[in-house]
Image (cartoon, helix red, strand yellow):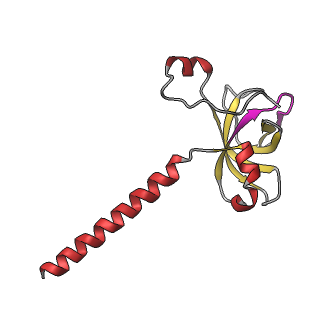
Amino acid sequence: MSWRLLAVFALLAVALVFLLVEGLGSSLDYFDTVSQAMAHRQSLGTQTFRLEGTVVPNSIHATDAGSNFAICQGSEVVHVANTGSPPGLFKARVPVVVVGHFTSDTSDQFLSNSILIKHSSTYVAQYPNRVKKTTSGPVC
């Protein structure tokens, strides 16, 4: 009887460790940058993920469903079709994180249902240990 109980506890411990590792591992990568996503488009396919970039000036166009715009990092550009209302701070040259997926594994078209504004420089200055600086560079 004690061997069975020990085996059950061991199995539960292994399952708990597996769930913790899987849960923490997937939460560590909050988003992919435009460059990372474009480099790994084929492996990303049409799965949902978070994509970070800077809104390209003069690219925002309102649609019946939401808005279309482009985000960039360096020379890489992704065209986003977003459904829903963008947040109040959404504008050109603002770093954003969009949640959605590519239309195919070879496309630069990204379908999004959520736009998150990244923290401003005043927030970063006030809480320097809370925000990692991005390497997205100047607006394309």
Q: Which residues are magenta?
A: 52-62
Question: Which residue: 56% across, 22% down?
Answer: 124
Question: Which residue: 48% across, 26% down?
Answer: 129
Asked if residue 120 is among those painted magenta in the image, a careful observer would answer no
Q: Residue 40 versus residue 121: which sits nearer the camera?
A: 40
x then y, percent, for residue 102: 75, 54
x then y, percent, for residue 139: 79, 28
Asked if residue 54 is among those painted magenta in the image, a careful observer would answer yes
Q: Residue at the left extreme?
A: 1
Q: Residue 136 versus residue 96: which sits nearer the camera?
A: 136
Question: Which residue: 49% across, 22% down?
Answer: 127
Question: Which residue: 45% across, 55% down?
Answer: 23
In the drawing, does residue 85 fall left or right of residue 128?
right
Q: Residue at the right extreme?
A: 58
- Is residue 63 visible in the rendered image? The answer is no
In the rendered image, which quarter contains the N terminus? bottom left
Report which quarter residue 74 is drawn in. top right
In the rendered image, which quarter contains the C terminus? top right
The total of numbered circles placed on residues is 0
Q: Residue 96 versus residue 5: which sits nearer the camera?
A: 5
x then y, percent, for residue 56: 81, 32
Report which quarter residue 125 is drawn in. top right
